[in-house]
Image: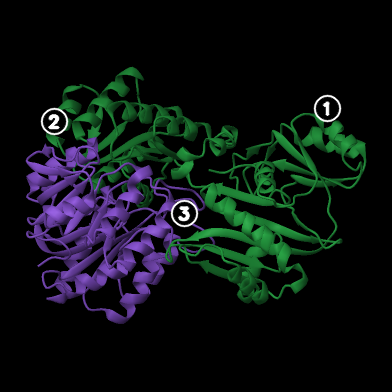
Amino acid sequence: MSILIDKTTKVLVQGITGNEGAFHTRQMKEYGTNIVAGVTPGKGGSVFEGIPVFNTVSEAKRRMEIDATAIFVPPPFAADAILEAAESNIKIIVCLTEGIPTLDMLGVFHYVKSKGSILIGPNTPGIISPNKCKIGVMAGYIHREGPIGIISRSGTLTYEVVYQLSNRGIGQSTCIGIGGDPIVGLKYVDLLKMFEEDEQTELIIMIGEIGGTAEEEAAQYYKISRKKPVVAFIAGVTAPPNRRMGHAGAIISGGKGDAATKIKTLEEAGITVVKNPAEIWQAVMDARQKRL
Amino acid sequence: MKIHEYQAKDLLKTYGIPIPKGITIKNKEDAIKAWESLNKANLVVKAQIHSGGRGKAGGIRIVNTRKELEEYVSHLLGSTLFTEQTGDEGKPVEYLLIEEAVEFKKELYLGFTVDRSRACISMILSSEGGIEIEKVAASTPEKVVVENIEPLLGLKDFYITRALVSAGIDAKYFRKIALVAKGLYRLFIEKDCSLAEINPLVITANDELLAVDAKINFDDNALFRHPGILSLRDYKQENPLETEAAKYNLNYIKLKGNVGCMVNGAGLAMATMDLIKLVGAEPANFLDVGGGATSNMVKEGLKILVSDKDVKVIFINIFGGILRCDTLANGVVEAARELHIELPIVIRLEGTNVEEGKRILKEAGLKFITALDMGEAAVKVAELLGKKEING
């Protein structure tokens, strides 16, 4: 198994002829993702890398069967692109765009939910089920298929963790970036639930960072469920308070969201928190050993 | 992005929110003119810096005579103010806001911000406004009322009424406070704020409302559609190295240690800093070159690192997903040659085109120390620092 996406997932790319969209469409295709259509307003009727391009999402949806969409649309227009996908009833929407104004996302978040669609991101590296399907910008070759589910708020830190695991022969079921922005679609709790139901996944890694309360909410949920072991890492223990550290989300405010609070809350819920980012693989091995 | 109090008040005014009578000055002559045109006694002089805690740091004072005003203005203008929020570098005082002091019956708090987990704008109202609002919120949370506004509804009247009733505010002020709340909400939406607060919002002796202090922050991601707001940016309130970095789309934050770090991606950058600390060293900065860094950005990043005199060792940790390792290696080699960097550089490279990247580094004939993984790299950094201490 794996969660959300697999070999059968039929993918649309919004912004397929833009710089980013074009580059990553080729990369995804090479990885084996089944890309069935693209959208770029004004380029309808053309073909990109053998993929038919449409002017609008609804037209693409009428003509092709589509399960998921990858959005590579520049920040000023990305919120609209998400709404367009949800309005056309696309079930899984992955928005890779970084830098969308926060207020644009408020209405988007609630509309997507009301349509029963799932939003991943924005400002995410995307989602990958190794050897099956990749909807995102991560380097495919570092992954291998296996029993570990990864949920992360960071891009390159996730690559780091994946690399540590793959190098030691530990594969992944699905790796998903929830996105670094203040407002994102799926959060840790939603994904913990999915991984708990997934037969392939034995252990879940949560990679968090300072700011917001998403990790604390996950801890609250896990305290009760505890279905599968969870290993976590929180980046930003040494970050000075009240400073932005790149992700719009990483802001410490009012005593909430700092690393110490997050680590304590996670540990109290029964989650193993790793302190050394170079040793996440070790904690995973230990946790699996304990289970055997 | 942050702005000054006087700029925030100008914005409030355009949204129909009453503010005290005042004048912003940047030299002593204008201060005297302000004295003449204001009520000539009982004036508040407020240092304009991007930081809270100004009062406790000596940046706000009431003056009653012209002499007092002149003395305080000469003392404050051109000085550097250190508050609990500015850190050791402090903030330069270039502008002063001179206002007529206000007699008031009550101080309220009114603010709007984004609630991330609920994905909505929240309105916060309290009848116990003033500098201790955070203590009030912590010790008596029932005195701080929060209304979460449905994005599809916007700030409807019932939200305001409900908040006013819960906060225990006298009904005779409802209409006036509602007007202020609506104005502030409209500003928040129209200008893409991340925070808009009036603290205190006072009820004067004549039962009028006045915004005595205000703080407005903007969403950096939305500045592209607000050129007017962008023009309010005061670069002198920001760290010069950070400003320089921003020019090249680099995200740099100065810290206190001596290990200069360059990493791609904010999460990995923070994890790298945490790791440096774990091996007993201190990061000198946070520097995220981003996913799409070019060799020029890498070069500019290195320039900023070496311009920081505290840096003793440079640690480059790159996981190239989108950023290719050969691009990075070229940037590092070019910068090291051009800047004649003598500091030891520990490099850990992984990801797309890593072999090519390693070859470039090797063939450059420069003294780079490479490591297989970030753990090993951090240990090498610590070793170098240890040796330095022994030698020096």
Query: Which residue, given by chain and number where applicable, does mark 1 sit on?
Result: B29
Residue B323 visible within the image: no
Residues at circles 1 and 3 in contact by the CB criterion of under 8 Å: no
Residue at 86%, 34% in the rendered image: B70
- Quarter in which the N terminus of chain A is drawn: bottom left
Query: Which residue, given by chain and number where applicable, does mark 3 sit on?
Result: A251
Please state the horizontal and vertical placement of residue B227, each as a whole percent of the image. 52, 35
Which one is closest to the eye, mark 3 or mark 2?
Answer: 3
In the depicted structure, whether residue B88 falls above or below residue A286 = above
Residue B69 visible within the image: yes
Asked if badges 1 and 3 are on one and the same chain, I answer: no
Residue at 73%, 62% in the rendered image: B176
Depth check, front residue: B72 or B48: B48
Q: What is the distance, in whole Å, between disc 3 and disc 2 at their CAs?
A: 37 Å
Amino acid type at circle 2 is: Glu
Amino acid type at circle 3 is: Ile
Task: Check disc 2: other Cα within 10 Å, few if <14, some if 14-19, many if 20+.
Answer: some
- Quarter in which the C terminus of chain A is drawn: bottom left
Depth check, front residue: B43 or A291: B43
**Colour that chain A carries in the picture:** purple
Query: Which residue, given by chain and number where applicable, does mark 2 sit on?
Result: B356
Task: State left or right for residue B273 relative to residue B77.
Answer: left
| Chain in green (letter) | B
Residues at circles 3 and 2 in contact by the CB criterion of under 8 Å: no
Q: Quadrant of residue A165?
A: bottom left
Q: Secondary structure at mark 2?
A: helix
Residue at 20%, 35% in the rendered image: B324
Please state the horizontal and vertical placement of residue B331, each as a whole percent of the image. 27, 26
Task: State left or right for residue B36 relative to residue A21.
Answer: right
Amino acid type at circle 1 is: Glu
